Amino acid sequence: MSGSNRLAGLKARPKDTTVAEVRRVDEVGEARGFLDRTPRKKPGRKPSPRTYQLHPKVFPEVGEAIAAEAERLGITQGQLIEMMWEEYQKLAR
């Protein structure tokens, strides 16, 4: 028999999908050591709503000052830039 004809005689049969039958099959599988393979939550952090990226070119002393101030406040550099932007908008009005 060639590889292409090996499964030619098989016929598809509908499976019993009643709640009781599915529960019975699950119980048998668990008893024999099969694990539940339902999809799990994605591991890792939740995605941030901050998705826009900036790549400003600044003088080294300015970049170091921004990094130090963000560290002192316990926030990210992006959050510090957002705070500075809010203050700028208040003054610009």
Image (cartoon, rainbow, N blue to C red):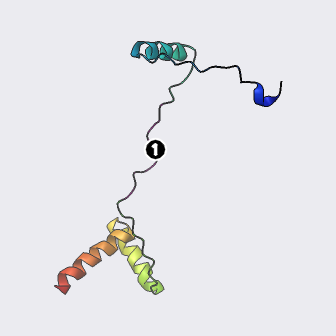
The answer to whether residue 40 is magenta is yes
Q: Which residues are magenta?
A: 38-48
SS assignment at label 1: loop
Q: Quadrant of the N terminus?
A: top right
Residue bearing the label numbered 1 = 42
Residue 84 vs residue 34, the one in the foreground: 34
Q: Is 19 above or below relative to 60? A: above
The front one of 17 and 11 is 11
Principal secondary structure, stretch drawn in magenta: loop
Q: Outermost residue toward the left?
A: 93
In the rendered view, tell whether residue 84 sits above or below residue 45. Answer: below
Could you say where residue 93 lies in the image, as x and y percent from the top left? 16, 85
In screen coordinates, is 85 left or right of 34? left
Q: Residue at the location (45% across, 18% down)?
A: 17
Residue 49 belongs to magenta span:
no
Name the foreground residue: 26 vs 22: 22
62 over 13 or under it: above or below = below
Instruction: Identify the residue at image location x=50%, y=15%.
Output: 25
